[in-house]
Image (tube, helix red, strand yellow):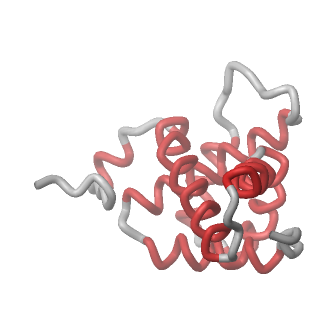
Amino acid sequence: MQDYLHVTMNDADIGRLSSLGLAHIGDCVYELLTRGRLVSGGLTTARNLHSHTVALVRASAQYAAAQVILPVLTEAEQDVFRRARNTKVHGVPKAASKAEYAYATALEALIGWLYLKGQYERINALYDLIVQAQPELPNK
């Protein structure tokens, strides 16, 4: 049976994906990390879970998260991040600046790249830095 939860790809196959393809899977992984954080942090109502998730995964929050992890990225991670940040996108959400959206896309692409390489510990280490830098969550 195929393991769709822990999809891994070799470097050649990952290299054939566009930055936006990496961001596509990375967006999902980042949101799953955030949802897991909120549920394990004690938020229990659907309304609180949803509103906090949206606040933490929007482009402006991901821009701030990217700033936190940039200093600790390896050279290969920086290359993935830079390539994705410079990708031409055809639209930017109204609530985000072009820079915020570019950095959010780059963060998602990096997370997607790490995920497809099976580097779950590295994803958790980077996400932990992001969590440590974020203010405490509001009351449950």
The N terminus - image quarter = bottom left
Q: Of residues 74 and 4, which is closer to you in this image?
A: 4
Residue lying furthest front in this view? 45
Q: Residue 98 placed where, x, y %?
A: 84, 33
Q: Residue 29 placed where, x, y %?
A: 52, 55
Q: Is residue 30 left or right of residue 71?
A: left
Residue at point 68% right, 76% down?
41
Residue 75 sits in which quadrant?
Answer: bottom right
Residue 53 sits in which quadrant?
Answer: bottom right
Q: Residue 86 placed where, x, y %?
A: 69, 38
Q: Of residues 74 and 139, which is closer to you in this image?
A: 139
Residue 8 sits in which quadrant?
Answer: bottom left
92 shown above or below 137:
above
Residue at point 29% right, 49% down?
12
61 shown above or below 91:
below
Residue at point 22% right, 57% down?
3
Q: Is residue 38 left or right of residue 19?
A: right
Residue at point 53% right, 64% down?
76
